[in-house]
Structure formats: C-alpha cells, structure tokens
Image (tube, rainbow, N blue to C red):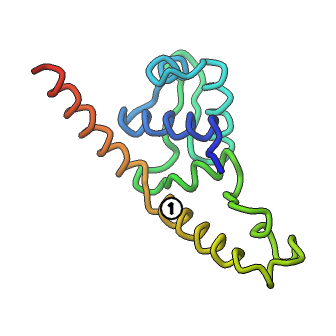
Amino acid sequence: MQISRRSDYAVRILLYLATQGNQCKTAAIARHQLIPTSLTRGITRELVANGLLESHRGLVGGVRLARPPETISLLEIVESIDGPIRLNRCLTRPGECPLDRLCPAHRVWREGLDLLRGRLARATLAELAEQGKALRQSFWRKNEA
C-alpha cells in the first residue's frame, strides 16, 4: 500500500496554507511546494469540493483552509483524495473474500488498518505545521554554523 502522489501533494498544499495562516494563490503554493501548477489547481479544486479549502476568485483571490488546522486530520486529507484506505480487498466489506471468516490473516489486516487509520486521524495539520516549523529552524541553525 502506498499513499498516492496526489494525496502527498494535498498534504503539502494544506500544510503550506496552515503555516501561512492566510489566503494564497495556487501558483505561489505550487512554486513553494515544488508541485506542477496545473496539478496544484486540480488538487485544490478537489479539496474545495471536499470541504477542506475555500476558494475566492478575483485579483485578491486564492485558496485558504475551510476550517482551523486543529480540526483537519491527515486521514481526512488522504481519504478526501484517495478514498478509504484499504490494506486488503477483504476489508472492503464482509463477504468480499469468501474466506474472510476462516483466514487467520484477516484479523491482522483489520488490526493493522485500525492502527494506521487511528494514527492518521490523530495527526492534525496544526500539529504537523508546528513540527515543520521546528524542523526548518533546526535545519537553518545547523547550516548557518
């Protein structure tokens, strides 16, 4: 299982907005996050449609977070782009696999999925933005010496 590049970009877009604290143009986000501009526009449209961003048109337009960063989880971002996370097809719905009730690995897949979803649900944009700020400060201090 691997998170899609679009989900990774969505996280980077939302983190950038969380650190900026205000509205930004998609071209500026693309430039700062090293994401192709056309892809940034497409992903931001999807994030607006899923209620994570607000979009404003015009000369002073741009996008901004639709909610406070403390209320947006990594799980919500990933699932808004990729859909529900699955480790195995047997977890999509009961009976999807005819052996799900007899398979000893089924319970382990379920536990693993629950752990992953729980961790992603607890990671908020606010928490990640603070960690990113600390990492950048540490990086620049080390490189100034």
Q: Position of residue 55 (x, y in %)?
A: 59, 33
Q: Quick one: which residue is furthest to the right in this view?
A: 98
Q: Residue at x 13, y 19 (%)?
A: 144
Q: Is residue 63 left or right of residue 110?
A: left
Q: How many marks?
A: 1
Residue sitting at 86 percent across and 72 percent down? 97
Residue 52, position as x, y percentages in the image: 57, 46
**In the picture shown, does residue 35 fall above or below 48?**
above
Say above or below: 89 vs 3. below
Q: Judge from the rendering whether residue 57 lies leftward or rightward of residue 22; answer left or right.
A: right
Name the residue furthest front: 104
The local secondary structure at tag 1 comes to: helix
Residue under the image location 67 percent in, 44 percent down: 81
Which is nearer the eye, 15 or 58? 15
Q: Residue 19 in the image: state x and y as whole percent.
A: 36, 36
Q: Quadrant of residue 22?
A: top left
Q: Is residue 140 above or below residue 8?
A: above
Which residue is more in the foreground, 16 or 115? Answer: 115
Residue type at mark 1: give it.
Answer: Ala
> For the residue carrying disc 1, how many other residues have a C-alpha within 10 Å: few (<14), some (14-19), or many (20+)?
some
Question: Image check: 17 left or right of 40?
Answer: left
Residue that mark 1 sits on: 121
Furthest-left residue in this view:
145
The C terminus, quarter of image: top left
Residue 82 screen position, x and y as percent: 69, 47
In the image, taking residue 106 as reference, residue 134 lies left or right, namely: left
Question: Which residue is at 53% across, 26% downward?
Answer: 62
